[in-house]
Image: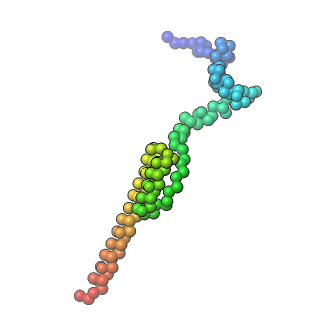
Amino acid sequence: MAVPHSSFPTVASAGARGLRKRGQSDHPAARSALASKGNINADGPKECLAATQPASQDRVWPPRKGQPISVPMPAITDSRDALAAIAAICKALERGELTPDEVTALSSVVGRSIQVIELQDIERRIAALEEARDKRDEEKNSLPG
């Protein structure tokens, strides 16, 4: 059974029946929150949109879970520095300056630094081996024979 188009509510008839337009609320908490922020005035809908904008941003970008932390740590350039960094992290945990989750995150950073140092060491060793091989090949080729 088809419903005639004229039976759908229009904006005018919706207002007459007490339905609200988008952005309007009868919820007491919403009204008091807007009133406390000074957002209820002659520009009602525009101000309501501005008041709800931060809430909609939370849906686009999730709220930040962690907080910045400050722990004095040495620059990590070799394995001894990594050991000193781990010691600094453990001391901060012992003093109650870091939570176990923060220790895990910082230890992960130190672990990545160790991996980078190891990779650089391997690259340096390979370059030295290739140079030694090239030098040996040049000496073989330059010998009369």
At which x and y percent is residue 89?
A: 46, 52
Name the image quarter holding residue 27: top right
Q: Is residue 19 above or below residue 56?
A: above
Residue 78 visible somewhere in the drawing = yes
54 sits to left or right of 139: right
- Please report the residue visible at 54 percent of the width from the left and 41 percent of the height from the top: 64
- Please report the residue visible at 59 percent of the width from the left and 33 percent of the height from the top: 55
Q: Is residue 84 above or below residue 39?
A: below
* Nearer the observer, 57 or 3: 57
User: Coloring scheme of the render?
Assistant: rainbow
At which x and y percent is residue 90?
A: 44, 51
Which quarter shows the C terminus? Answer: bottom left
State the residue lying farthest toward the bottom. Answer: 144
- Please report the residue visible at 49 percent of the width from the left and 10 percent of the height from the top: 1
Residue 45 visible somewhere in the drawing = no
141 sits to left or right of 109: left
Q: Is residue 144 above or below residue 2?
A: below
- Please report the residue visible at 33 percent of the width from the left and 72 percent of the height from the top: 129
At which x and y percent is residue 12?
A: 68, 17
121 sits to left or right of 98: left
* Nearer the observer, 101 or 23: 101
* Nearer the observer, 92 or 26: 92
